[in-house]
Image (tube, helix red, strand yellow):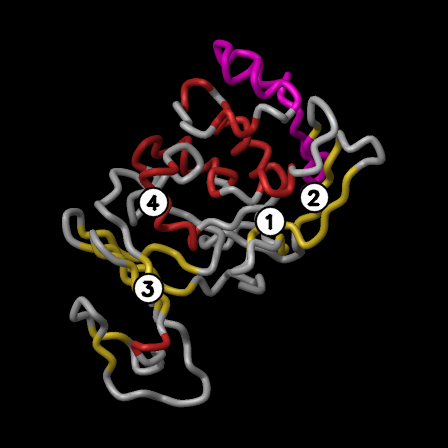
Amino acid sequence: MLLLSLFSVILACDSVDQVQETVINSIGRKLPPDAAPVEQQIFRYMFREPTTLDISVATYEADGTFFAFERLLLLDENNILVPGAADRWESSQDGKTWTFHLRPGAKWSDGRPVTAEDFEYSYRRMLDPASGNTYAFLYYDIKGGRAFNQGDGTNPEILGVSAPNDSTFIVETEGPCPYLPYIVSFITSSPVPKWQVEKYETKWTEPENIVSNFTYKMVEWNHGSDMTFALDENYNGPH
């Protein structure tokens, strides 16, 4: 289980080798019997409560909950690229087309499959000028990225992202872009659930509406007090 207070995030890792007595974390929360000892837990913190967990457009607000949304690629503890939602990727010979192959069997926390169309939608959304994404400029290497983001948002078809099938996501760039894998590992590159965004709009990240695709899912948000996340039983990845 993961508990997020206004000031801290405590990650209670599962321990399969031994069952502990009652574990109380640093903010006085009783953790499950199989929680790791406090000294083995991962500590993260937020300096204030976010107003939204819409991680693809509100990076400053939602940065502390990156563990709920899996990007195509991730960085490990040594800043080495590792597979995320994509288990393999390659570049064209001219370095201007990158193809990402999604991990088979990946699901959202509500059981729906994670598809390339989810990433296509999310990239278009986070570059839409209406989103107000602070980090949109990081994606200007994507073909049409600058023009779309600095335009009126009525021509998303100029953006060089596509999903030829459910498991293949393609990104075209303005020129050779050997560092694109690092760009897609950035937290703003997280996918969001289109069906929930369109249904609930700005309320899609409330606990009764939110759907995620990574190791943890939100189960409770007591505004002004704390957030609780639990392991997502639908997540089939390595992290």
Question: Which is more foreground, mark 1 or mark 3?
Answer: 3
Q: Disc 3 designates what residue?
A: 43
Please provide percent x and percent y for residue 214.
Answer: 48, 55
Residue 142 position within the rendered picture, expressed as x and y whole percent measured from the top left: 63, 26
Q: Secondary structure at mark 2?
A: strand
- Amino acid under disc 1: Leu
Residue where numbered disc 4 is placed: 209
Q: CA distance from mark 4 to mark 3?
A: 26 Å
Q: Secondary structure at mark 3?
A: strand
Mark 2 near mark 1, Cβ–Cβ under 8 Å?
Answer: yes
Which segment did they paint magenta?
A: 143-171
Mark 1 to mark 3 CA distance (whole Å): 23 Å
Q: Earlier in the sequence, mark 2 or mark 4?
A: 2
Q: Give amino acid for label 3.
A: Phe
Q: Which mark is residue 137?
A: none
**Amino acid type of the residue that numbered disc 4 sits on in the rendered structure:** Asn
